[in-house]
Image (cartoon, rainbow, N blue to C red):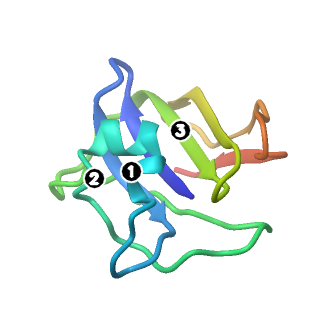
Amino acid sequence: MAVWIEDADGNFVKTLALYHRANGDNWLKTLSAWYAASGGTDTTTSGTVPAGSFTAVWDGSTAAGARAAQGSYYVCVESVVEHGSESLVRQQVEFATSAAQTTLTPAGDIAAAAVAYTV
């Protein structure tokens, strides 16, 4: 599973969570949307996880460590089941001057996803 942020133009900003086998992971490229967006180099989180609920936090920084500007971004969540389905939620969210909560539209095996934004 991968969770990442893209800017309003669809450019990769930062990986927030990435769950995969740390060594010898032949399946990492099956997270095809994340892999295409990030180039597969921003691998930061931990090993594979079973189905369930997870939290990812974005501190507003880019992968390079700069502060991202307020504005429209895509929140992306991708999951892949070994020898099974691939699911992608990609939805535009406004990160502005006031707090907001957005429920993302479910897709495939991703039954629910939400974004809570605090200022």
Q: Residue at x 44, y 36 (%)?
A: 33
* Callouts 2 and 1 close, C-beta under 8 Å: yes
Residue at label 3? 75
Task: Answer left or right for 42 relative to 87.
Answer: left
In which quarter of the view is residue 21 placed? bottom left
- Name the spot of residue 114 as percent of width and height, x first: 73, 46
Q: Residues within 10 Å of mark 2 (few under 14, many from 20)?
A: few
Which amino acid type is marked by label 3?
Answer: Val
What is the x, y in percent for residue 74?
49, 31
Q: Secondary structure at mark 3?
A: strand
Disc 3: CA contacts within 10 A as few (<14), some (14-19) or many (>=20)? many
Q: Toward the viewer: 49 or 106?
A: 49
Q: Amino acid at mark 1?
A: Lys
Residue under numbered circle 1 = 29
Q: Position of residue 49 (x, y in %)?
A: 65, 75
Q: Nearer the viewer, residue 59 or 97?
A: 59
Instruction: Identify which residue is drawn at 65% across, 66% down.
Output: 55
Three-letter amino acid code of the residue under disc 2? Gly
- Which residue is denoted by mark 2 in the rendering? 40
| Left or right placement of residue 9 versus residue 90 in this view | left
In the image, which disc is placed on residue 95?
none
Residue 56, position as x, y percentages in the image: 56, 63
What is the C-alpha distance between the residues marked 2 and 3? 17 Å
Between the residue at mark 2 and the residue at mark 1, the CA separation in whole angstroms equals 8 Å
Q: Tell me which numbered mark, 3 or 1, is placed earlier along the sequence.
A: 1
